[in-house]
Amino acid sequence: MGEIKSSWELAMERTAGIQSDKSAVRKNELKKVGQKIASDYMDSGSPEPKELQKAIKEYKGEEKKAVEKSAVEILLSHISLPRDENFQERLRYVEKGLKALVGKDSQLSSMLEQVSQFFTQYLQHRQQLTEQVKQQYEPQLKQKQQNLTRQYGYEIELKPEQDPEYNQLLQRHMQQLEQQYQDALNQVKDQIRNFYGG
């Protein structure tokens, strides 16, 4: 009969040839440091770019670049399609953080100003799309109201938001709009990454 091995023995056999790569471990640690620095910066009540710079200055050479790169990625992750007009403050914090890391450059300021305008346009398009879908769906909604009135004997007023079919239609249109804007936003983020050199 064959020999039965314990789980521990099987695991040890599988990992026997694996050596720990100290540089990969250090790179991962530096990535986490950069992420934490940028997250702390964005999560503070009033982010101070000087604090961001101060935290990163503790590192030199390639380590500093690795920390900066992961910090830039976290800052870029805070540039996302807005749901309301309150995006300006968050975008301003991201801009200050990126300038602290990348340097004060008019090209970066110009890109982020375009992002701000882009977000305003996106919110306008969302509102317009909502109105268009409501108008498009209005005849169907009226027909449903008439059917319910006949069925129950008294007038029933429906709002589009109460109708699952309307909500599905709106959601489909919104997803298409969001995808178009998200693709454009991703291109801008890639430009900022390239600007940074990451």
Image: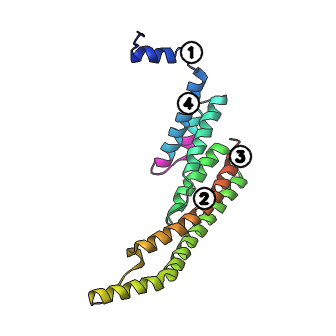
Could you say which quadrant of the image residue 175 lies in? Answer: bottom right
Q: Going from the N terminus, do you reach mark 1 or mark 4 first?
A: 1
Going by the numbered disc 3, the residue's amino acid type is Asn
Q: Going from the N terminus, do you reach mark 2 or mark 3 first?
A: 2
Please say if 132 is above or below 55.
below
Name the residue rendered at 56%, 49% in the picture: 77
The residue to which callout 4 is attached is 28
How many angstroms separate mark 2 from mark 4 (CA)? 28 Å
- Which label is found at residue 82? none
Q: Does the magenta stretch include residue 43?
A: yes
For the residues labelled 2 and 3, say whether their Cβ atoms are less than 8 Å apart: no
Disc 1 crowd, CA 10 A, few/some/many (<14, 14-19, 20+): few
Going by the numbered disc 4, the residue's amino acid type is Asn
Q: Which colour scheme is used?
A: rainbow
Query: Which quadrant of the rendered structure holds the N terminus?
Result: top left
The residue to which callout 3 is attached is 194
Please say if 197 is above or below 113.
above
The percent position of residue 52, horizontal first and vertical second, equals: 55, 41
Q: Is residue 127 magenta?
A: no
Name the residue rendered at 41%, 74% in the picture: 161
Q: Can residue 13 be seen in this view?
A: yes
How many angstroms separate mark 3 from mark 1 (CA)? 38 Å
For the residues labelled 1 and 2, say whether their Cβ atoms are less than 8 Å apart: no
For the residues labelled 3 and 1, say whether their Cβ atoms are less than 8 Å apart: no
Residue nearest the viewer, comparing 164 with 71 = 164
Specify start and end residues of the magenta stretch as a single range.
Answer: 42-52
Could you say which quadrant of the image residue 154 lies in? Answer: bottom left
How many angstroms separate mark 1 from mark 4 (CA)? 21 Å
How many angstroms separate mark 1 from mark 2 (CA)? 44 Å
- Which label is found at residue 182? 2
The residue to which callout 1 is attached is 17
Q: What element carries label 4?
A: helix
